[in-house]
Amino acid sequence: MIHRRDMLVHSATVAGLLAAAGLVPTAAQAAWNQPAFDAKTMAEAIKSLGGAAPVESKDIVLTGPDIAENGAVVPVGASTALPGVKRLAILIEKNPSALAAVFEVSDAIEANIATRVKMGQSSNVYAVAMMADGKVLYSTKEIKVTLGGCGG
């Protein structure tokens, strides 16, 4: 009888051999835009992601609590029904790094994301939609934090 632990060991060995041989599909490897995640402001983050000057839009819906009791796990979401969205991003104005999350989307899927972010203090949170035609749209909401989650 093969045990779960043995199966995991064998799976890890096979995955390592496939990776060493260059047989891991490139779609399975995550892309990382370090300058965007290092950006201190919304403008720097959007520029690093290849976007233009953002314009406020009522078509972008940002969800999140008015008051978050714990800044370490603040639930936020972004959605839009607009066609041609290629990226949805969550930015937090007063965090050490403004960009909290970015998601690649296409017309084949609904542009609707939800995640949990860390917030060090009360701040404006932005949901940003980057469109295929180069437009950048956003909506904003202030979320008050009672207990900081970014080391505070």
Image (tube, grey):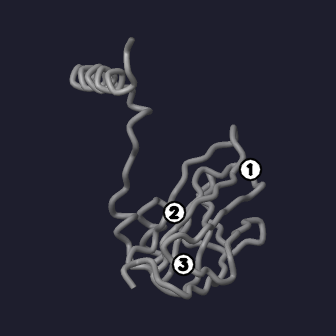
When the figure is inspected, residue 131 is found, relative to residue 54, above or below; the finding is: above
Q: CA distance from mark 2 to mark 1?
A: 17 Å
| Amino acid type for the residue under numbered disc 3 | Asn
Occupied quadrant, residue 150:
bottom left
The residue identified by callout 1 is 83
Mark 2 Cα within 10 Å, few/some/many (few <14, many 20+)?
some
Of the residues under marks 2 and 3, which one precedes in the sequence? 2
Q: Mark 3 or mark 1, which is nearer to you?
A: 3
Query: For the residue marked with disc 2, what is the amino acid?
Result: Gly
Secondary structure at numbered mark 3: loop
Q: Which residue is mark 2?
A: 51
Spatial CA span between label 2 and label 3:
32 Å
Are there few (<14), some (14-19), or many (20+) residues within 10 Å of tag 3? some
* First reached walking from the N terminus: tag 3 or tag 1: 3
Query: Quadrant of the image for the C terminus?
Result: bottom left
Of the residues shown, which amino acid type is indicated by label 1? Pro
Q: Secondary structure at mark 1?
A: loop
Which residue is at the front of the view, 123 or 9?
A: 9
Q: Nearer the viewer, residue 39 or 148?
A: 148
Quarter of the image holding residue 39? Answer: bottom left
In the rendered structure, find residue 70 and report the number of the disc placed on it.
Answer: 3
Asked if residue 36 lies left or right of residue 129, the reply is left
Could you tell me which secondary element the residue under label 2 belongs to? loop
- Asked if disc 2 and disc 1 are in contact, CB closer than 8 Å, the reply is no
108 vs 144: above or below: above
Q: Is residue 100 above or below residue 94?
A: above
Mark 2 or 1 closer to N-term? 2
